[in-house]
Image: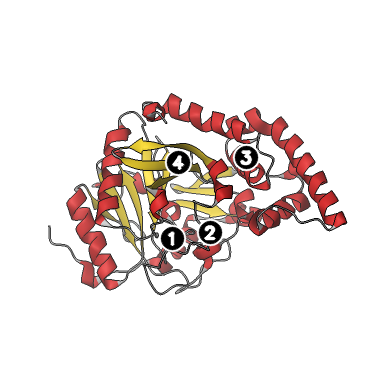
Amino acid sequence: MSTAIFSSTSRFQQAFNEGLVEMLNHDSLGTLILGCANATFDPFIFDATHAALRNQFRKLEQRLLADFREGRQVDESDEDLLVFLKMLVVGFDDLAQTDFREEDGWEIQFNQVRAFRPRRMSGQAGESLRRPFNPDGFHFNKPFMQKECFWEGELNGRAAALFYNKYPFIDYHALLLPERQKNLPQFLSEEYHRYVWQLAEQLGDGLPGLGFGYNACGAHASVNHLHFQMFLRPRGLPVMAAHWRHNGGRRSYPAQCEKRNDCRAAWSYIDDLHRVGIPYNLIYLPGEILIFPRRRQGDYRQAEWSGGFSWYEMGGGTITFNRQAYDGLDADDITDEFAKLRLQPKECVINE
């Protein structure tokens, strides 16, 4: 495919939105769920797809009802069936739009449809940053996943694919898979660190607000297949505010945040984290990276309102699936959760 979609924000948004509309031609639960999740997140997508989504929802509801009554085999994944049944309980017209508010500079969102998703490995306690790729587990080369890919081609000298994030939580949320046919596990090597660093630099001029998030195993990675979470957020995330010390300001960020403006220095720090087995989250931006060493998932008790802290939460966004919690969360609740994650890895001091 042509790389023209990366030349400007308008072209990327057009390809993203047109792909969602086209995907509704597939008569499957997976594409319906993806469409509903993106529509409830983005009002523009909601307006463009709402009528088609309602029709498809009713059609699939009737088809599944007939299949279950007759005892016929249903050709859908168990995960998609479970999510769709949750949506049926709520009702299509009562699926809530994602709400946002700010609290003392932090971003809080109530994301109902994302609450329906399977946790996969993001909900598991694990001991190792590196786990072997499991061809029998969930991964992006499964045949049923191909409908969710909206761009594939050569990008910066490598084969790459962009998939929709099935349950988005940030603007124009996509999954970048470099050389996905190699079935690489979710473990970052210097080779792919450099690739994404260079990609952010090369595409950043045409795509203002471009970033790539990364979750290591043990830091709420949900799929053990090498991927980076692409987004377009011109206004930035709270962690990018000028008042934080890592950006030259005076305030200390409540989580450990290491900022590097050099690709090699960044890799040296990440490699040290690998060496001592410390999980981390990353946010790649054009010409810089934010590194968040943190406690391993499962090693602390997270608040009931939290689904876990991934790169987005470490960057100052908070997702809750409970409306009451959304209305009541304050800055102290968020910083208290950061405190549980904070870790000062003495082994990883880098002399610059």
Q: Position of residue 206 (x, y in %)?
A: 34, 28
Q: Of all residues shown, which one is farthest toward the right?
A: 69
Q: Earlier in the sequence, mark 1 or mark 2?
A: 2
Query: Which mark is first along the chain, 4 or 3?
Result: 3
Front in this rendered view, residue 134 or 101: 134
Q: Gap in Å between the C-alphas at discs 3 and 1? A: 33 Å
**Residue identifier under label 3:** 35
Seen in the picture, residue 263 relative to 12 is either above or below; the reply is below
Counting other residues with Cα less than 10 Å from the Cα at mark 1, is it few (<14), some (14-19), or many (20 or more)?
some
Residue 104 % position (x, y): 45, 49
Nearer the camera: disc 1 or disc 4: 4
Nearer to us: label 3 or label 1: 3
Amino acid at dot 4: Leu
Check disc 4 and report the residue beneath it. 162
* Cβ atoms under marks 1 and 4 closer than 8 Å: no
Q: Quick one: label 2 or label 4, which is nearer the N terminus? A: 2
Q: Earlier in the sequence, mark 2 or mark 3?
A: 3
Nearer the observer: mark 3 or 4; the answer is 4
To which residue does mark 1 refer? 335
Tell me which corner region of the image, top left, top right, bottom left or bottom right, holds residue 48. Answer: top right
